[in-house]
Amino acid sequence: MSSKQVSSNTLLQEKLVLNPFDVNDDQMLEKIYMTHYHCVEKYDVGSLHSIASKVIDHSIEIAHSIKNGEQNEQVREEKDTLISCPRFPTLKRISCQMICTGRGEQYAHQTTMLILEQLREYSWDAKAVIALAAFALEYGKFWQLVPIPRDKLGKSLAELNGLHSIMENMQQLDHFNNLVKKVMEVVKCITHWKKLITGDYNVKDVPALTDTLHEIPVLAYWTIITLVTCTSHIDFLGDKGYRYDLSKFDYKLDYILKNFKEHQDKCNTQIERIKDYSKRKDIINNSTETDIVKYLEALIIPVDPQDPRPVVYNVLAQKEAGIGVFKNKYVLLFISGTDNIDYETQLLISIDVKLREEPKEVEGYRKEDFSILWIPIVSVWDEEQRKKVENISEVGWYVVKEFKFKTGIDLIKEVFNYKGNPIILLISPQGKVENHDAKQIISTWGIEGFPFRTSDHIRLTQQWNWFWTEIKNLSSTIRELINRDCYIFIYGGTNSKWIENFSSAVEKLKNSGTFSLVETTIESYKLGSESPKNVPRFWITIDNMLASRKRIKKGDAEVEDSTTREIKNLLSLKQDPNGWAILTKGSHVKLLGFGDAMLRTVMDLEIWKEKLDHEVSFDVAFKDYYEKCEFKSVPKKCEHREFANYPTDILAHLPCPNKKCGHEMGVASVKYKCCHGLETGDIA
């Protein structure tokens, strides 16, 4: 006898004597997997499963009606289903092997292993479904003959199958059918698993699938061996002396089904999270069908009650608020950790204060329609992290406390490309991100960047190009200072005393030792310091710019663009009898200032510098104090401004420079006179 034959006989003996109930699932998995090859057979498992299930369901219905003494009704005809499955001889051969299996778990195991080897090239779900179909083939035929037919052939077939005594064994049949139903439930689980594993989800997306991968072969084995056992007893169902305990299989199926369903529930939970994530992402990316409330709900509010529900907190009012408070609002969405965010929080504090100040409307945007929402993201919410959030108080914004919603955090990381560094976004009432980097415009322009759109940064950057083009032509010094991105006081005027005082005050400010950081380096440049002849040339050029500006039509009205307004402001500033000064940060103009108020602000450094201790930038602190000084120093009388040789339609809407007046100046020939609150005496 060859070694191959010896090995084959040994394997056969092992199959013959092995009792599957004496082997644990891990040991059984090793034996089962030896019969499985790479799946190459492709066919419609779903259709075969559907037909086999219908046969079994109808058979059980017949059993139920007979037990209750009911007349069995003809099952309604259903449309034939064309399927691609193992050829009938294969199915019949397997059903014959099953029905011819001897009593005993060892024999059932032997037949099961033979079936697995025959189906070695089929997928695990296909193996289970084919076995179910083979069982249905015999079980359906059996119950088709149970209601004793009236024709001679039917009666003879019923007698041959021993069905004359079926009514005497209905209790045993109930136990049998209950086990069949349980097997069908297991097969349904296996086919459902196959849809998951071959669908749009993989092990990376659904980690729980890893556990089911190892359980499916064992689950398929116990499905087939149970079907083998049931099939082998079909011929004895009509025997009134038939008694066989199937409880072992019942308990085993209960056990493996319970474990598998636990893993399946985990899979379904993870898949539902994926679907939920996808749905929320669609809401965030599709602003045409959402609004700001739905947008924020998709980002921070979980549906699953097991997920911790965050609290939206009104910091200023010291109370909770619902998401509905943001309806019809523009939201500055601040996303960050709780460490190293002093710069960003101070930026937002300054913006928060300015949003509640006049003017209330800028270019159709109302400041009261803007809210700030902070979503702090930390790995663990402990007492230290909670205190960091609570320490930011007395501000008019909202904060999401203890944000732990994993789906929301993942969305923030993917959609907003959040990697730990603080970001500020502007989101419209329609749920559209209008600026993915509002931090840039806020840090550069402060409240002047309102309403903080991407276009506002472009507008503010470009609206002073005309100024820098001309002033760079005057001096190489100013070009160098701009490239250094430092703070620059550009100043001038006809009052030599004011020029001297301002120059000295700026030098004193620079040497005060208050500004130690590179970003607060302060320099100054007197217009015409290199060549006094350049001054009138500069102003003549600016005058000509204004004359060449064209008004923009908006509907039936004509309006000025921002560049025209800035040119007018600069020309108006130039006529201050004391002097004028412009504060810039690199090429970004921060403030146009009248002489007395600018000088007073520079000299009063000791009064307002304490604001710098709160991480407020130099230009913000300077401008805040300047506005107070300007309010006090500007004369109560309205001012006159005279411009020569300008067409009246260009200067038709020049406002009175006195901010306390606020009215437009009227045109009198080529002179502007504010016609409101005018008292005796003109102020040049």
Image: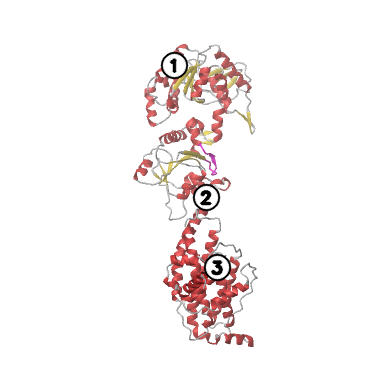
Among numbered discs 3 and 1, the one appearing first in the sequence: 3
Amino acid type, residue under disc 2 in the picture:
Arg
Looking at the picture, which amino acid does disc 3 mark? Answer: Lys
For this view, does 347 lie left or right of residue 58? left
Decide: is 209 above or below 649.
Answer: below
Q: Secondary structure at mark 3?
A: helix
**Residue 502 numbered mark, or none:** 1
Q: State the residue in front, 576 or 73.
A: 73
CA distance for labels 2 and 1? 58 Å
Amino acid under disc 1: Phe
Left-right relation of 547 to 215:
right
Q: Dot 3 corresponds to which residue?
A: 127
Q: Is residue 534 magenta?
A: no
Mark 2, residue position:
280
375 up-or-down from 462: above or below:
below
Between the C-alphas of marks 3 and 1, the distance is 93 Å
Q: Residue furthest left?
A: 383
Magenta residues (range): 427-437
* Label 3 vs label 1, nearer the camera: 3
* Residues marked 2 and 1 touching at CB (< 8 Å): no
Q: Earlier in the sequence, mark 2 or mark 1?
A: 2
The percent position of residue 642, horizontal first and vertical second, equals 57, 17
